[in-house]
Each structure stands twice: as C-alpha cells, then as structure tokens.
Amino acid sequence: MTSPSALLSSVFGFEAFRPGQQEIVEAVVAGQNALAIMPTGGGKSLCYQLPALCRDGVTVVISPLIALMRDQVRALHEAGVPAGALTSGNTDEETDAVFAALDRGELRLLYMAPERLASGGTVPFLRRIGVNLIAVDEAHCVSQWGHDFRPDYLRIGALRRDLNVPLAAFTATADAETRDEIVTRLFDGEAPKVFLHGFDRPNIHLAFAAKDQPRRQILAFAAARKGQSGIVYCGTRAKTETLAAALCAEGHAACHYHGGMEAEPRRAVETRFQREDGLIVVATVAFGMGVDKPDIRWVAHADLPKSIEAYYQEIGRAGRDGAPADTLTLYGADDIRLRRAQVDEGLAPPERKSADHARLNALLGLAEALGCRRQALLGYFGETSEPCGNCDLCATPPETFDGTEAVRKALSAILRTGEWFGSGHLIDILTGTETDKVRARGHSDLPTFGVGKDLNRREWQAVFRQMMGHDLVRPDPERHGALRMTHDARPILKGEAAITLRRDTMKAATQRPAVRMLVSEEDAPLLSALKAKRRALAEEQRVPAYVIFPDRTLIEMAETRPSTLDEMAGISGVGVKKLERYGALFLEVITGEATPAPHPQRRKLAGRDEGAVFDRLVEVQAELARGPMGVDKPMSCSTSLLARVAKQRPADPDSLARLLGDKRADRFGSAFLDVLNEA
Ligand code: ADP
Ligand code: ZN
C-alpha cells in the first residue's frame, strides 16, 4: 500500500495536508467509521479520495449534487485517477463506459446520486463490484429538520449495514442537533470517530460597512476586483436584476439569479459561473448549495444576511482554493427592521423566534464590533483566537466614543412618546426639528425636545442603528415598526451601565479603493498570461478552468517562476499526471522560451479566433511589462481590456489609443498593432 502522503504529492501535487486532513485520512484508511465536520473549502473531498486510492476495492461516494459529482470526476481524471459517476445527468454512453470500467475492475471511485439507493438492484450491484468504503458528502442532508433534507439519504444507514463496510461522512454543518441526527441515521447510533475541525478561514478578508449609497458601495467594491469571479447577495429578487444591470453597465460580466427564475435559465447561470473566469452573479440566497467553484475571489452582501450562520456560509463560498478572497457586508437600520420583522411575522413557535432573534443579534454584534471581526465570529462558534490581521477592523480600528449619554437621551425620547414612533420622528425630537408631525403631537413641549443638538442627523441615525444592533430597542411590527425598549436597555437608562459606540466613517464610500491584485504588480502580467493559457486549455477540453489548475497554483507559478520541469513539479497542485500533461505548456509561458512552430490548424484559427489574438496580446504584454529594455516601471492592461482589444481589433494607432489610454498605448500600442495585423 502506498502511503497517503506519497499519494498526496504524486497524485494531487500537494506538499502537505491541510489542518485536520491527515488524522481523518488515517482513520478512514484504517477502516474506522468517521464523521468529519470541516468548513467549506477545508478540503473534505481529499479525505475520501486519498483513502480510496490507498485501500483495495471501490469507494462509493454519495453526493446530492450532480454537477459537482461530474466536476469531481473530471478533476480526478485530470489527476489520472480512474473514477466514474452514475447520475441521471449521464448520457447512455457515459453510463456504459462506467459499467465497462467497473467490469474491468478499473474504477477506484464511483460517485452516485442518493436516488439510486431506492432501486432494489443497487446493493447487490455494489457488493458485486467490490465496494469496501462508503463516503457520504453533505451528510447533513440526512437531517429531516434541515433545509437540505434528502429522503433518499435515509437509505444510507441500511446500505452500510448490508455491505458491512466502513462509512465516512462529511459535512460543513456543525450544530450539535444535526451531528446527533447523522450519528443516529448513518451509523445506527454507534458513535463513529468524530473530527470537528476549526471554523477559521484565514484567507478570507472580512469587512462590514454601514450603508451609505449602497449601490455605489457595491459598484466600487466590484470595480476594485474587476475580472475576478464574485457573488453579490441581495435581499430581494428585484434588486438582483437592477444591480446586475448596473454592473454590466460598468463593463463587468454579470448576471442575476433568484428563485423566481425558471429552472432552465437558473441552470444556465450556474453552468456559466462554474465555467467562466471572472463572472459576477448577483443573487438571492437561492444561489447556494449548488455553488462549488473553488476560485470565487469575492462575496459581497448588498443587504444584511439573515443570521450569523447564514453570513458564515455565504462568505464561506469565497476562496475555497485557499488563495486570498475578499468580502464586504453592507447593513443599515432598514435591514435590521426587515430581519426582525421576518422573524416576528414568521410561523415558528415562540422559543424558535427568540433563538432566531439571538442569531440575528450575533450577526449585528459582528457588524457593530469594536475589535477584530474574526475573533468575534470565531467566538460565536466557540473558538478563541488572536486578532487576525485580515479584517477591516484589524487594519483600521474604529473610532469610538462613550455613547451612554446619547443612548439615554434616545431612550428617554422613546419612552416619553409612549414607544409609538420610529427613528425619523425621534431624531426630529432630539435635534429640535419642528416638523408638522412634531407640532401636531405637541412633541416640541417635551423636555427631550432639542436635547441632542450636539449630534447631527446622520450621527443620530448611526446611534439608533447601533442601538438596534445591540438589541437595546426593537421595532414592533404591531406598531408599524415603532421602536420599543428591550430589557437589555434598562441598566443603561438607569445609569448602571455604560456603552461604547462607533463613529461611522462616512468617507469610505466616496473614495474608490485601489485595485486589489492577487500578486504584486510585477507578477501580474505573468499571472494573466498563465490564466490565458489555462482558459485556452479549459475551453479546448470543455472543463471549468480550475480543473486544469486552481488560482493558487497559478499564483505560485507567477511568484516563484519555475524554470525547469523539476521546479514545476514542486509547485503545489502540480501532480505527476498534470506535470506530464501541462507542465511544459505552462513552463513555456513562464520562461517565454521559443514556442514551437504553430500547428497549421492553429495558424488558420488565428485568422478568426479572438481567443488566439488575446493569447498573443498577453504574451506580447508580458514581454513589454517592464518596457522594451526591461528597465521601466511595471505596467499591464487588465484582462478585460485585452479582451476588448482582441474583440474590437482597432486598426490604427489612434483607435487603439482610445481603448488603451495614452500611457498604455505608449508602451504596448505598436506591439499590439503588430499582433492585430498578423491575425
Ligand atoms: P470542501 O471541504 O469544501 O469539499 P474541497 O475538497 O473542494 O473542499 O477542497 C477545496 C480546495 O482545496 C480544492 O481546490 C482542493 O484541491 C484544495 N485542497 C484540498 N486539500 C489540499 C491540500 N492538502 N493542499 C492544498 N490544497 C488542497
Ligand atoms: Zn481581525
């Protein structure tokens, strides 16, 4: 038996296990029943794929998502591992090929949709082909109380008993109830070895911002990440459509996605997202479980998520490949009102409602946090940690002030008006603004009238939002959202407790953040050349780009610039098979060594294919990145700009300069024109 760590590097090209993987792999290889709870992106698949290769016989993998199974099988083929899938998405030829390979005893992993378990022939079939390990992905689908319940998952327990082989179950859902249910249903209550792996996703940058021209905030965030795949989550279906349109108008590739769309266009978006490099999907939370793209570089929330769990899950879709990923969550008083109302107006029993309020409170606490966000987030999941250095608050600690006095004034305004008003009217009272409503109700005679002139309207809004965030006041749905004091506010009102508040930084939205790059400016042109090569290969083979190599691998290539195949083999993600298949091709991009004479077919293609022109532009740009003599300041064009040049093919220096701008036209103009003329 080859050792797991040898296979880790030879097949998958990874130098080391991720935290937690090794123990799980060892237990599964040893034939123990196992339940592993790992965050999304933690590297669960490896924990059954490696044991499958170490053990004799076939490993059957049960997974609820057909598209994901197909991608995994493709990725395994790329790594030289014989695997197959039996799903309703197969063509007859594909199914025949799987059976033939099984008959020849070649397959090591067989992916199967749970629906197949309903057929009586399945167990004898699995026994006949020599299944000796069952791996269950998304094991929480067995929980009848969860959102993702799959009735056929309930048959897995019987399958395990019938085959009498070890079972390894994987999920990212950690709460104790679900865990217990998995143990009962999959392992007949006989405790498996449980691996509870940490929740930290250190490569994900965390940031929140109070809403202030939210559309501009989102557009600015996306602009700084142009060309990178991202998701924008919105609270409403209508907003997904308008925001996607706004992003397209700014030159992004963006589309919308929500539960009100037909199945067909939804699937089309999912497929495009999976395949394309750099697409933005603007979606409601309906865009969820089917998303398994490891190279999502950013996630933005245009509206506050429903709870801290939802937040964690949604941002967790970014950066599964371990490369840096960015997030931004916008929130405002209206979000808090909406989310409270959703809980209050829901049909859940009272204890459930108060639990939901608590989960929302945890998220609001995170939004209004004064110290490291990651510490607050992990703290909620029961983990202690040091300040992370990778969140907005670690970078810029918030300006705070003693808000006790302001909060007491606000509470007093609320109480003196009988808890019948919303923040707008209350702020009028506090700032001494004589509106018709104030006059009509005689509120200008209140002792609180005008006591809050030291803060302006906007500052008061921030105070009220934070009071809602700290759950000192809650909108009452029975009173059209009027604010009512909660129990927690009493000590502050009575002068027994103090509270520190944040001063909102309002300038954030007006300045466009600098473009975030995955690598230094110097390495950027090479990275885009490597990506172009990857895209060409992916299109040729009709697979998602990351199946060829994930972002992380390309980043490492761009940064370390291997110059021989041996050095190439040392890059994380380059296994033996991939080295054989792609090593030389990527090496060529890096060293710029003489490309072998183009195939005649390719030459012909070059006349029409904008992809080929694009490739050439990337190459030429890489050569000129530091100017003709290699001594100038590094400069590059964005991928989308190069794509535009390839598409529009400007014929003369002037129209090219209009596209590129003067500085870039100076450096690249004539070389680009040469490329366009030879095409
Ligand atoms: P999940 O736990 O969400 O199922 P995956 O199994 O899809 O995560 O793994 C996420 C990404 O991490 C994949 O791109 C995978 O290739 C990569 N990965 C897994 N294990 C390692 C490792 N030991 N070293 C480097 N990358 C790894
Ligand atoms: Zn931090």
Image: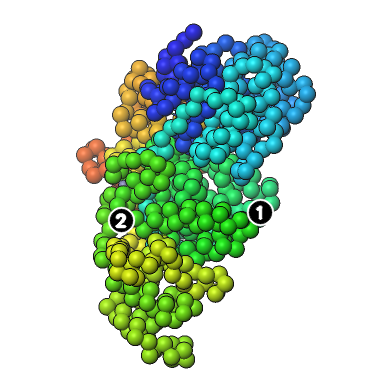
- Find residue 136 and report its horizontal and vertical position in percent: 59, 28
Q: Position of residue 166 (x, y in %)?
A: 58, 18
In the image, residue 186 sits, relative to residue 675, either above or below, namely above
Residue at 46% x, 43% y: name it.
316
Q: Is residue 417 visible?
A: yes
Residue 675: % across, % down: 42, 40
Residue 653 in view, yes or no: no
Residue drawn where x is 34% and y is 70% of the image:
493
Q: Which image quarter: residue 540?
A: top right
Q: Find numbered disc 1 in the image and state the secondary structure of the residue it sits on.
A: loop
Q: Nearer the viewer, residue 104 or 205?
A: 205
User: What is the x, y in percent for residue 651?
Assistant: 45, 50
Name the residue located 37 percent from the left edge and 87 percent from the top edge: 446
Residue positioned most to the right: 120
Q: Earlier in the sequence, mark 1 or mark 2?
A: 1
> Residue type at mark 2?
Leu
Q: Within the image, what quadrant is residue 662 found in?
A: bottom left
* Element assignment for label 2: loop
Residue at the (49%, 33%) spot, across then down: 37
Respond yes or no on whether mark 1 lies under 8 Å from ligand 1. no
Instruction: Judge whether 370 appears above or below 549 on screen.
Output: below
Picture quadrant of residue 329? bottom left
> What residue is shown with label 2?
370
What label sits on residue 261 in the rendered view? 1
**Image height of 362 relative to 23, above or below:** below
Task: Give, as a three-letter code, the residue at label 1.
Answer: Met
- Horizontal side, residue 501 vs residue 190: left or right: left
Q: How busy is the neighbourhood of tag 1: few (under 14 within 10 Å), some, or many (20 plus)?
A: few
